[in-house]
């Protein structure tokens, strides 16, 4: 499904991440946020970006559920003209044989859901002239990385 071109604006990452932290505070999974600087902004549709963050954090929570010391770490590093956002968990990881399917529409490893989450995330990030990818190791966890052009 095509995501409608949305109204893009300056989004402050610190604010967006704090919102996500609050949204998932009931899940009893620590979400640690590390920002390289206080004010980092990207040009993206704010609602769509919240969907991306929410989806990635929700997937991370799913990956660490039932673990002894679950942790989700969100890091933001700012370079000259781009922002790198990493969402890392210490969960189950993604099996090698499934890695190539992760961004395909209708692919899911969960018992519920449509499997559109990551396909839509990818579309939203690419519409904002960004990139999204992941590294995963079974039994150790997964890190999703988003790279977006930085605004002022």
Image: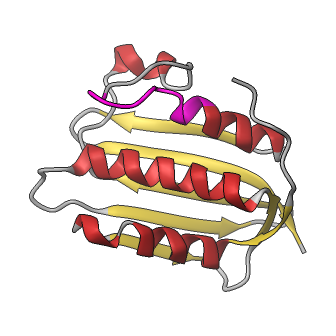
Which residues fall within the magenta stretch?
A: 110-119
Residue 91, image x and y in percent?
Answer: 25, 46
Residue 21 sits in quarter:
bottom left
- Colour scheme in the image? secondary structure
Q: Quadrant of residue 24?
A: bottom left
Which residue does the image show at 59% across and 51% down from the upper left? 51
Which residue: 73% across, 62% down?
46
Quick one: quadrant of the C terminus? bottom right
116 to 145, vertically: above or below: above
Q: Position of residue 112 (x, y in %)?
A: 31, 30
Q: Residue at x 28, y 45 (%)?
A: 62
Please give the name of the residue rendered at 58% of the width and 77% of the height, measured from the top-left corner. 35
* Left or right side of 50 for 115: left
Residue 94 x, y percent position in the rendering: 34, 30
Which of the pair 66/46 is nearer the observer?
Answer: 46
Considering the image in quadrants, where does the N terminus appear?
top right
Question: What secondary structure predominates along the stretch shown in magenta?
Answer: loop
Q: Residue furthest top?
A: 97
Which residue ends up furthest to the bottom in the rendered image?
38
Number of labels in the image equals 0
For residue 46, side relative to residue 56 (left or right): right
* Residue 84 image point, x, y percent: 66, 58
Q: Is residue 62 left or right of residue 39?
A: left
Does 113 appear in magenta? yes
Residue 27, compared with residue 105, is above or below; it is below
Decide if residue 1 is on the left or right side of residue 25. Answer: right
**Is residue 96 inside the magenta stretch?**
no
State whether residue 46 appears in this view: yes
Residue 29 appears in view: no
Please tell me whether residue 31 is drawn above or below residue 94 in the rendered image. Answer: below
């Amino acid at each position: 499904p095509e995501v409608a071109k949305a109204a893009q604006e300056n989004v402050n990452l610190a604010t967006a991440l704090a919102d996500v932290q609050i949204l998932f505070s009931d899940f009893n999974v620590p979400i640690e946020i590390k920002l390289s600087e206080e004010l980092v902004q990207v040009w993206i549709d704010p609602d769509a970006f919240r969907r991306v963050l929410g989806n990635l954090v929700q997937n991370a929570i799913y990956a660490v559920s039932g673990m002894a010391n679950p942790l989700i770490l969100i890091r933001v590093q700012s370079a000259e003209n781009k922002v790198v956002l990493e969402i890392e968990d210490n969960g189950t990881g993604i099996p090698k044989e499934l890695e190539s399917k992760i961004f395909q529409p209708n692919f899911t490893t969960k018992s519920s859901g449509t499997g559109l989450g990551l396909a839509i995330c990818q579309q939203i990030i690419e519409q904002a002239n960004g990139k999204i990818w992941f590294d995963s190791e079974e039994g150790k966890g997964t890190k999703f990385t988003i790279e977006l052009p930085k605004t002022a």
